[in-house]
Image: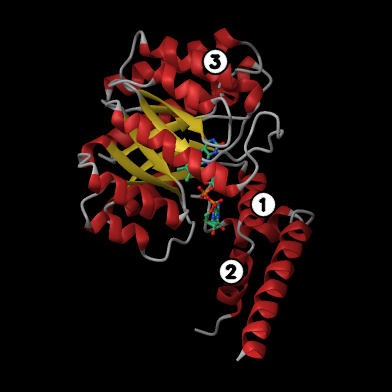
């Protein structure tokens, strides 16, 4: 019995090691070889493709938020082009009657050029979103941009109501940020945080990040705000769902969010069946390569699934 358990553990450890090594090796391969692995996570390269995917998600009961892959643009021409593409996406969302909004990265609409460029582009997007009764979520990038992202959000709130922010539970500062921002108008996505941050400013252990995650969500919901609970961590989802039920939080005060293509073992359908809102973050665009490699490194098990499907006999 012990031998069997040890063998199972050894097998799963060596599979994980093999998948992780493959993920690193894959990042060195030419783009055409990575494409099959990118497919589950990226909704194509064109607006037409992403709109088709979002329509399919809507049919299944999911709402969506569309993200154009890329970040850190260095010229105003690029920042204007990205802003224009987001405007086109919003027109397509409206024309197709889709249940979707957009998520933008501040450095993708010009924050690295200067603050004013990012603010002007954000306001252009918010005006359009207002016109079609949609919403813009400001994604949170790494810590050098946290203050500017919050400033963008606060400035936007003075003029618009259809704007939301993201706060990362791995940052020590997040609890203070939430205390400052919380209230009925606060609309925030809570995520763990994806960037590598120093120990001096960010929790490193999963337990601490999760503990903070729960505290942040509870604090926002206890103060009248709206939360998007963005995680694939099933334990975290279970724990928060229990708290929400116990505290009789109305379902229109929160939603669950996941990244398009991440396997969730039927949990999303179960959440929908209970009447909760579930939104999928749907990235697309020409810059799919780096995003997909990041996803594969996060969950190298995907490599085995894709390989199995590629070689499966029909
Ligand atoms: C809708 C959404 C929006 C996000 N926006 C931001 C943002 O603006 N700023 C930011 O810093 N981060 C953002 N993130 C990323 C987030 O911070 C985490 O890095 C990421 O979601 C992994 O954390 P987790 O909560 O899923 O928990 P984990 O503990 O990392 O993962 C839980 C389980 O899910 C699996 N899993 C997790 N992620 C993936 C994946 N991508 N592919 C396959 N399996 C996976 C893991 O293998 C594990 O089994 C966002 C995440 C989501 C879901």
Q: Position of residue 139 (x, y in %)?
A: 50, 30
Q: Position of residue 297 (x, y in %)?
A: 67, 55
In the depicted structure, whether residue 27 falls above or below residue 310: above
Q: Please name whichever residue, 96 or 283, is drawn nearer the observer in this view of the structure.
A: 283
Disc number for residue 118: 3
Q: Position of residue 274 (x, y in %)?
A: 22, 55
Q: Earlier in the sequence, mark 1 or mark 3?
A: 3
SS for callout 3: helix
In the depicted structure, whether residue 281 falls above or below residue 125: below
Location of residue 300 (image quadrant): bottom right
- List the residue tagged with mark 2: 306
In the depicted structure, whether residue 66 falls above or below residue 164: below
Question: Which image quadrant: the N terminus?
Answer: bottom right
Q: Do tag 1 and tag 2 residues touch (Cβ < 8 Å)?
A: no
**Residue 88 is at least partly visible in this image:** yes
SS for callout 2: helix
Mark 1 crowd level (few <14, some 14–19, many ≥20, 10 Å Cα): many
Residue at position x 49%, y 30% in the image = 167
Disc number for residue 293: 1
């Amino acid at each position: 019995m012990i031998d069997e358990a040890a063998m199972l553990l050894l097998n799963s450890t060596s599979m994980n090691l093999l998948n992780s090594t493959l993920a690193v090796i894959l990042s060195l391969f030419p783009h055409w070889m990575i494409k099959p692995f990118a497919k589950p996570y990226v909704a194509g390269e064109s607006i037409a493709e992403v709109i088709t995917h979002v329509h399919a998600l809507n049919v299944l009961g999911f709402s969506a938020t569309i993200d154009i892959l890329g970040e850190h643009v260095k010229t105003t021409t690029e920042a204007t082009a990205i802003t224009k593409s987001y405007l086109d996406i919003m027109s397509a969302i409206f024309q197709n009657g889709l249940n979707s909004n957009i998520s933008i990265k501040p450095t993708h609409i010009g924050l690295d050029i200067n603050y004013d460029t990012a603010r002007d582009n954000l306001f252009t997007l918010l005006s359009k979103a207002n016109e079609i009764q949609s919403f813009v979520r400001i994604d949170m990038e790494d810590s050098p941009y946290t203050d500017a992202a919050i400033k963008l959000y606060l400035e936007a709130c003075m003029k618009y109501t259809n704007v939301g922010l993201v706060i990362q539970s791995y940052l020590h500062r997040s609890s203070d940020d939430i205390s400052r921002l919380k209230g009925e108008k606060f609309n925030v996505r809570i995520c763990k945080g994806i960037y590598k941050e120093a120990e001096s400013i960010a929790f490193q252990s999963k337990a601490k990040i999760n503990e903070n995650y729960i505290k942040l969500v509870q604090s926002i919901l206890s103060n009248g705000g709206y939360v998007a609970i963005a995680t694939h961590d099933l334990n975290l989802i279970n724990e928060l769902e229990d708290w929400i039920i116990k505290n009789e939080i109305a379902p229109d005060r929160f939603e669950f969010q996941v990244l398009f293509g991440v396997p969730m073992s039927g949990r999303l359908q179960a959440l929908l069946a209970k009447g909760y809102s579930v939104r999928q973050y749907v990235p697309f665009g020409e810059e799919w390569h780096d995003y997909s490699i990041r996803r594969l490194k996060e969950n190298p098990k995907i490599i085995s699934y894709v390989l199995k499907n590629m070689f499966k006999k029909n």
